[in-house]
Image (cartoon, coloured by chain):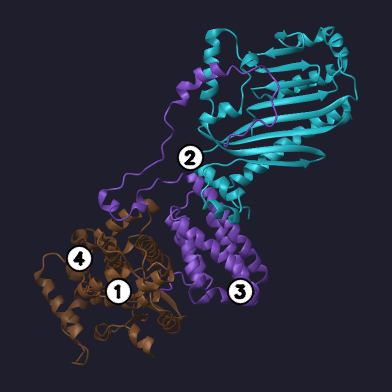
Chain colours: A purple, B cyan, C brown
Amino acid sequence: MIQQTDIASTNGGAEDLITTEQIYREELEKPQVSPKYEYIDPFFRSISTEFTRETKSHTAIIIERTFYTKKMNESIEWLSENHKSPIESTPHIQRLLANLKIYKEDYFDDPYSSFISALYDALVFNDSWINLEKEHYKELKKIMIQINNKSNLNYDAIDKAINKIEKLGLDSTPF
Amino acid sequence: MKYSPRKSIFQIRYDPKLSFYNRLYKNENLSAEFPHWQTDKLSITLRDWNEKKHSIRIAHESTSFESDYYNKQYEEEAISFITNEILNYVDDGTFQRFGFRRYYLIKQDMLFSELAQIMNLKCITQEFKTIFKNQADDLSITILSSINSNDFRLTLGPMKKEEMPKWIKYNIDNHISPEPNQRVKELGKIFEDYPEVAIFLDIDYFLSGKNLTLESLKNFWELSKIDIPKIIEDVVKNLIEKKIKK
Amino acid sequence: MKEKHFLDTSVLRPILSSPPKVKAYYKSVLKGEKYTSEYVNMEFLRGYINSAIEFYFLLAMPQYESFSDVLHIWSSKFQIREHKNIEIMIASLLKHNNCLDNKEKSLKVLADYIRRLVGKLQNTFKNIGNDSTYCPKGKLRISSNYHKLIETLHSFHDTLCDNEQYRNCKINEFIKQKNKASIERIIGNVGVTNGKNKAGFNKLVSNLKSVEETKDITCAYCAKLGDAIIAILSIDDWSLEHTDYSFNYLCKILGKKHRIHPYDKKIMDS
């Protein structure tokens, strides 16, 4: 929290700052909670420094995941109600793909990004997004919410979600 | 109420008048509700540093209730006490400002840097972020707005444990036992009880005007009980949203 | 009633991973339900996925900076089956992700795509239900979280290469007891005369003959008998889909319905 000059003083007794400092000093001098590091075998460490950085807490991952999924779903919601021709849909698809791209590149820590990258590849390859109907986007929105809200997301659930997007006519392994 | 405040201050400001002193010191009722009282001849402080950890300070320009331990019943009793007694030393229609300030620490199970990043993500636009290359190590946001004919100023930001005593100033003089051993114990416990990382919220909910009445004070108090928790819950819910409604 | 297709690995691979024109071809000709078995899945994992994992670890070596650095050694030294298809797949994947020159990003993208392929294999097809080889390698999945993904790839690869895994399957009973009669028919070339493109089939027959002399059919030996095993597993009136000439002979001997498809290159050139 950034220190500010006091905007409004509180009423009450005078603070004994010196006493407070003395009492709190021991606590204040305790080392901060250090970031969590996983032990990575040197063999793997030589592969990439990417894999030795601190692990993100589960809570932070879920909050950021939900934030981005909501943004993606805003675009998908529009497409589920209005998608007819590529021309009108382009700004919404552009926004959706931009958010998908941010998430798959910047949030690799989250296994959810594995689903996002599958969706991105499927929509982008051969511009498959054009051929989807409104109903497909409606179903896609449901899949996104379902997988986002899963409390302990694992790769089995992700693979099942990828299979669901395949059933919409998308190819998640287009290469 | 989903979140309990760490500290609350309910303050009534009024026109200062000399006759205040005559009327104040004649009022024996004032000390009846509190185990301890103190005066410096310009104001009276009624205090309970035992279980309740709260106090009322009555001065020529304002009366304030301050609490460092939230308990709905004690708070109701103390503020009702004020509203029942205030016209004994202040004239109706001379009130200038009602204010209810609450401080919250909403504990978060994540690192400080992660919380700062999340608040950065949610509160700052993408365009603005490019100025500092998307990396904000710390931030605080202050908003001035209104709800239901009352105004409020809300300050929020991520906070680490060692910052908390500086932002939430515990009323040590009036809410901590003066007995030395007990005092040391209680002071230590204050810091112990702080979370490692939390969302800090400081909300000042107020109504300013000329010639406000006791009736408007009571309305203000009733509305504050609904509005403040709602604002806090909505802000926190948005910041730490983990699921999407279907 | 919809036709049922039992997929040999040679068709399973392009259905999962190939250029759009090849996928479009299979989509147009295989309209019924598609089935695989643990054994077929194992062949795909051992052949295609394992090779992709080897490419991954090659790219991860400190002396290589990018995909193009690795390509030379991959093409010249790693003459394994499917190596060309893997090269095409990885090149397309990395180009699409704009990371041909970015080693860190390439590794992440490739690891994720390998994981995705394995997941798709396990979720896309029905199981034929009669695979009495009980090959445990066919059920392998990549299920752990991101931070253990690299270790998982490593142990995944090791398990697939482990020659001792035959101790956990029933391949010996499958070949030497349960399907002895079918094996003898294949060895005896029953009902089949000499024809073109028979070299692969002849080699298979020679390997089957040598089974008599082997005490245990290990994983390495089993790999030489794959076509025979898949042909035996195929259900009589289902269509065994393949690109391999040896199945023409195998299916004629065993009286199984089958269909041969062109290689990827031929489809692309058509």
Question: Dot 3: few (<14), some (14–19), or many (≥20) neighbours within 10 Å?
Answer: some
- Residue B245 placement, left or right of C165: right
Q: Is residue A136 above or below residue B170?
A: below
Label pair 2/4, CB-CB below 8 angstroms: no
Q: Nearer the viewer, mark 3 or mark 4?
A: 3
Q: Nearer the viewer, mark 1 or mark 3?
A: 3
Q: Which residue is mark 2?
A: B111
Q: Chain of mark 1?
A: C
Q: Nearer the viewer, mark 1 or mark 2?
A: 2
Amino acid type, label 4: Cys
Label pair 1/4, CB-CB below 8 angstroms: no
Q: Residue at x 35, y 71 (%)?
A: C90
* Same chain, labels 2 and 3: no
Label pair 3/4, CB-CB below 8 angstroms: no
| Residue at mark 2 to residue at mark 3: CA–CA distance | 43 Å
Question: Dot 1: few (<14), some (14–19), or many (≥20) neighbours within 10 Å?
Answer: many
Amino acid type, label 3: Glu
The disc at residue A133 is 3
